Amino acid sequence: MEHVTFLVVVVIITALAFDFTNGFHDTANAMATSIATGALRPKVAVAISGVLNIVGAFLSVEVAKTISGGIVDDKLVTPPMVFAGLIGAILWNLLTWLFGLPSSSSHALFGGLIGAVWVGAGMRGVHFDTVLQKILIPALASPLIAGFVAMTATYLAYTITARARHESVTSTFRFGQIASASLVSLAHGTNDAQKTMGVITLTLISTGALASGSAPPIWVIAAAGLTIGLGTYLGGWRIIRTMGKGITEIESPQGFAAEASATTVILASSHLGFALSTTQVVSGAILGTGLGRRLAQVRWGLAGRMALAWLLTLPAAAAVGGVAAAVATTGTLGVTIAAVVAIAVSAGLYAASRREPVHAGNVNELPAQPQRVAA
Amino acid sequence: MDIKWAALGQVLVVSLAVSVVVVVVFSLGVLAISARQVAEERHATGTGPLAAAVLCFAACAAVVGYGIYLIVPQFH
């Protein structure tokens, strides 16, 4: 393994750090509504989700063939740029987590890479038409489609079960939620851990440690799977609270309708060739289910802040990625400085989260004045 | 720049159709469960509602099975 340099080790560790934030950022997508309606106890929910993510990581063979999926020119990408892009993605993920805002981890990764490549290799390295097609349009379409589908499904669920007994309705829909939430977790594992495996494998290939076109070594699969599973298990409780309790008050028929709709939209989009963001699909479905139940309140201020976070994800991660690339592409000292600063900022964000911690015990309680500073 | 409107439209139509069918069938199952509980309390036979519930939930389970089939590449 003489090709494994200091830089490669740093890139691998950073990629796994991103994988970890990816896991705890996205637990909410699968489990927020199940936790909110009491279908699953919080700790049980994140444990199921974590295990299914690991299983999914091992099941999928579809490892990312390119680091960015064509959003940047992969021939121009060097390990320091990958490193800088990952830093941009990690810091944005941590910041949105601190504010409890669900935002797409994939978009953060793409944003970080765009910034890093722009600074490192110039504007010609970024394919802006692909950005529009793969990020902007899906970002607009996801919440609209999922929201509309979930709204229709919720309306029908309430209309049909209006005359049934309340207790039977609540408990049966809770049961159904467990199945739909598990499907989302499994789908997540087969998709998201692949991104990290792809990044690590392509970095190893670029330095000659692996032959071109190699499949990821088993330790890469295991590391990426376990890291995303651990991240998922630790649970981004702040985001779970926003999605489960913040957007709208969710009853179990709504939870089921939202999850069934989100699962269908995710699977349909990935098999019909129009990839949508899981985070935005689930958020849209929750919003739609709030609209589909009469008298349910949707907190539009929070929805607005979420939409703002989605819009900012790409440019913000790109800005951080760009700054990191400016430092990291200067050499080993630059990489070290960027890593130290990134660790310090992450520690700062974590420390800030401790002032008002959200955990399994209080995840279903809304803070006293949640949306006072609505956008 | 070409936006795949056809694919996007397909996603909307397929998602809407599948979600509505699953949620409606599941809701009918819920209705049947509730009917069975009411019947039992009146000491009437709840066999009809029970059969209906089993049928509804089996249909939903089949859809979940198809979902797992789609997610796991080894099945393709």
Image (cartoon, rainbow, N blue to C red):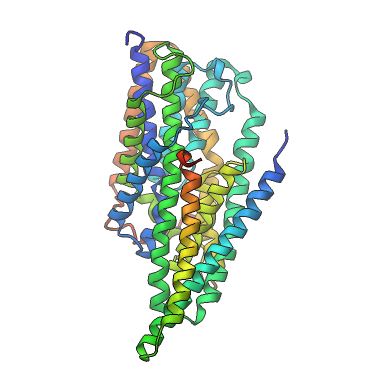
**Front-most of residues A107 and A190:** A190
Left or right: A133 in relation to A59? right
Residue A240, percent across and down? 39, 53
Query: In this orientation, does residue A295 appear?
Result: no
**Front-most of residues B36 and A108:** B36
Q: Is residue A83 above or below residue A110?
A: above
Residue A193, percent across and down? 41, 35
**Front-most of residues A348 and A230:** A230
Q: Is residue A160 above or below residue A179?
A: below
Can you say which quadrant of the picture contains the N terminus of chain A? top left
Picture mark count: 0
Residue A147, percent across and down? 58, 57
Which residue occupies 69% across, 49% down? Answer: B9
Query: In this orientation, does residue B52 appear?
Result: yes
Left or right: A2 in relation to A159? left
Q: Is residue A120 above or below residue A252?
A: above
Which residue occupies 45% across, 38% down? Answer: B74
Left or right: B5 in relation to A308? right
**Front-most of residues A25 and A50:** A50
Which residue occupies 61% across, 36% down? Answer: A134
Residue A338, percent across and down? 38, 21
Q: Is residue A364 above or below residue A189?
A: below
